[in-house]
Image (tube, helix red, strand yellow):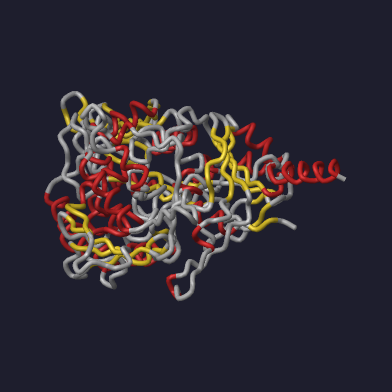
Amino acid sequence: MILIVALAITASIASAQAPPARADTVIFDLVKPVDDFRNFNWYTRRARGDDALSGGHQAMWEPLFLLDYDTGKLEPWLGLSLTPKDPNNPVEWTLTLRRGIEWSDSTPAAKQPFDADDVIFTVNMVLQHDSLNASEAATLRSQVASVEKPTPADPSNLKVVFKLNKANPRFAIENFGAGLFGSFLIMPQHIWKDAVGVDAAGKPRDPADFKFANPIGTGPYKLKDPSRIKMTWVRDPNWWGIKKPPGFGNDAFKKKLPDPQQLEWQVFDSETKSKAGLIANNIDAAREFTPANFADAKANNAKIIGWDTASALAWNDPCGRQLDINTKYVVDGKPTPWSDPKFRKALSLLIDRSTLANKVYGDAAVPSRTMFPEYGAMKPFIDAVVAGNFGLPPKADIAAGQKVLTDAGYAKDNADGLFKKDTKAIAASILVNADNPQDVAAGNELAKQLRDAGVDAKAVSMRNDDYAGQAIPEGSYEIVYGWLSCGSVTDPYASMARYATPAAPLGKRSPGFDNTGRWDGPKYDAYAAVVTNELGKRPVGHGGVPDLVKKAYQILDEEMPFIPLVQTPRIMPFNTTFWTGWPAKGGQGVPLHHWAATQRLIHGLKKVP
């Protein structure tokens, strides 16, 4: 009898310790090894594959708010509200946190609440240490003057007051909305207090050196087993989000414990291996696929899905592809023709966006009509631009483009088909990122189209370290194929403000990749005035914004310092063998599972019976 009981207890322990079955685990494709897999310092700028892409801000940490790309609204998460004291002068903002939030190391005997103290500690740490140089930290540091508790004091310790350096109606969405990739995250004071101050020898501590090697968050998953090739997270049955004490009312978090018992970010070091794993049901959420690989995967496994068949094949990344023209570039000591707006407009007329989309992206891409991503929340602004006749056509108008050249004194040389003046052909050099095969293909296709139309164009490939690290920010390019309008997802200001930044001298870095083409002059001044002094002062959702967008876009259309081309397609395949509810059509969220929006994705998954 004793033996039977002992065996039963042993079996029970073994069962309790057994890892979740495959059907209870979600496996995400990780594109690179996690070399520093014990470093979870969110605020240092380095290869983000270490803590972010492998589950950190997707499952362990939680944002204050999550942006909805379709509605443009901020969904309350850890925060309930973030509002300006005076909407007409938004220089002071009050954050109200949700009640009942606890850090994942909280126990009944030792509660660890998430409250105003954590927010104030984290913000002050970033304000006081420039060594915390991640973009989220730098952005907040550039905007916030101070952070404090309200007066009179909030007895629940859930309110925080931010005082800004200057009024900013977009403070909430720019810092805490997790719109592009991630947002400013709050860290636990009771752990990170050891990252600041002075050590035993009296030497100041630098929080940039703090690795947070045993990380915790407020999210529904805890780190279980980190390694270079696989990061494993286990569901926390004591997650704060499922506790709804009496009297919470509207403060209650209307979420349940996610269905997956375990999450794994596992390295598959090529698209070929990723496709094989997806077909064999060894991956649930794969990396970005080419149209050909996506079609092949679907042909070999009917459980594989992508974007909804009723819509475009791919989901549009916020960063559409375009040409930026360096208005200050010189060849043989002279400005190039592209310093003249009329030639930039001619260049746009000679490009066939539909052909570019088809040949490079297999019709997964949508030709761009404006500088903005084609999202639901952006529709009023895109419609305003198109209604003003400033939208771009999908097809080229070769005759109109060539007429600009002939009117300027160029004549077509029938021997080689190029337009020339004084025996010298009009030429264009297009810089592309050599590390992105689709960008290389796009550059080659654009060069071909322009040569066929009479412009002596060529595509020049450069490794990303030099392309993004030097050539673009320092302005050492003539024309560049890239993503430099990136920023807006629900409001037009972020993208438009990039071209309202004063031009840096050639050879000096443009801040934040803004206005790298060095556009300036009276028309630039007029544009910057509209964007900065009018559009920038309107709150998100203000009814007058579409008309201001149209007003500013008229100047962009006249000057054309950049040429929008195509939306950037992202084909993110999912496997429905074990899980359904993937974001595979509009209104279901963002399919990029290395972004913070993965929080919403995980909560939407349903286990297949």
Residue 188 image position (x, y, % from top left): 37, 48
Q: Nearer the viewer, residue 457 or 609?
A: 609
Residue 488 image position (x, y, % from top left): 35, 54
Residue 418 image position (x, y, % from top left): 35, 32
**Which residue shows up at 28% across the image and 57% down it?**
493
Residue 529 image position (x, y, % from top left): 15, 57
Relative to residue 528, is residue 257 drawn left or right?
right
**Which residue shows up at 50% across the image and 45% down it?**
357
**Which residue shows up at 66% across the image and 44% down it?**
295
Q: Nearer the viewer, residue 56 or 596?
A: 56
Q: Nearer the viewer, residue 279 or 250?
A: 250
Quadrant for the C terminus, please. Answer: bottom right
Quadrant for the N terminus, please. Answer: top right
Residue closest to the far right: 1
Picture layout, residue 42 above or below residue 463:
below
**Which residue shows up at 44% across the image and 46% down it?**
352
Picture layout, residue 434 above or below residue 263:
above
Q: Is residue 581 visible?
A: yes
